Amino acid sequence: MALQILQTIENISSIPTLPTVIERLTRLLQNPKTSAEEVGKAITTDQALASKVLKLVNSAFYGFPGRISTITHAIVILGFSTVKNVVLTASIFDIFRNKGEGMAGFDLEDFWLHSIACGAASAAIAKQIGGLEKEECFIAGLIHDLGKLILCQYLPDEFRSALQHSAENRQLLYESEKKLFGSTHAEIGGYLTERWNLPTNLQNPVKYHHQPSPAHDNHPMTAIVHCADILVRALDYGNGGDAHIPSLSEQVGKSLDLDSIDLDALLDSIHAEVEKASVFIQWT
């Protein structure tokens, strides 16, 4: 059954792809001689995307409200890596926002609030522990549940059954998915990130956010998203399709050294990051 689900998804030709500008940017950024002007030109080949990027970089989320006038200016101020992350974020929102109506037990507005809050919490945790790029952690948290959107839009009967089973049996949605059709939104989302050729450190938080393990991935971003998902559920930011709070992996607690983190300061930081990220909610 799991193989049938994945094969069905592989055969759906209408599953979205990322804009070609993402591939072009990735190639450009691999060359240390690439200039800000070249990157700016690559982004502005898609004028709609470029305008969304400018809207985002001028939001309070990036701390330069109304002060960045061109893509090249954004690159000079924010750096190549951050602008690439902005382009990726804008592209993902553009692909999925306002698509589909959701269904009983799965409200798309609540889903996006949960996803954005998970991104914000991931950024807050990254800031607390240090040594990681906040924007990249934000994206990992933002996209961790993409598989649910694929199920909702392309396999609605299966997804509806999983939602109902989760509610009736008071268990996590991914546990119901595994029991009913042998595959989960994490695996399906992981397939999508592979299809998009996203970096491994963004693929793995999608695939393993419910079951982080050194056997799968040693990168701390997966542990961070696992932790962020649990925290935003506990803080009641949106809803990802079930009302249950997963248990925190003991390995994650140790790997992130959570005992040494000031929890009150972390929660304050999460609230602040969610407040800043509210700009994204207007896009959904």
Image (cartoon, helix red, strand yellow):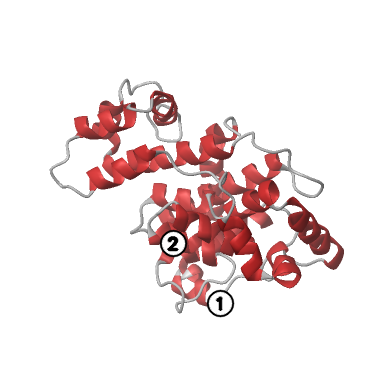
| Residue farthest bottom in this picture | 215
What amino acid does circle 2 point to? Met
Left or right, 103 with reference to 136: right
Residue 233 drawn at (x, y percent): 67, 55
Left or right, 126 with reference to 208: left
- Above or below 167: residue 156: above
Mark 1 vs mark 2: which is more N-terminal?
2
Please name whichever residue, 146 or 16, is drawn nearer the observer in this view of the structure.
16
Left or right, 187 with reference to 216: right
Task: For the C terminus, give its image quadrant.
Answer: top right
- Above or below 75: residue 237: below
Left or right, 218 with reference to 9: left
At x 52%, y 34%, the residue is: 94
What amino acid does circle 1 point to? Glu
Q: CA distance from mark 1 to mark 2?
A: 16 Å
Residue under pointer 2: 221
Label 1 vs label 2, nearer the camera:
2
At x 62%, y 53%, the residue is: 232
At x 45%, y 58%, the residue is: 194
- Above or below 116: residue 94: above
Dot 2: element: helix
Residue under pointer 1: 250
Q: Residues within 10 Å of mark 1 (few under 14, many from 20)?
A: few
Q: Which quarter of the figure has residue 187? A: bottom right
- Above or below 210: residue 238: above
Q: Which quarter of the figure has residue 20? A: top left
Residue 32 drawn at (x, y percent): 15, 47
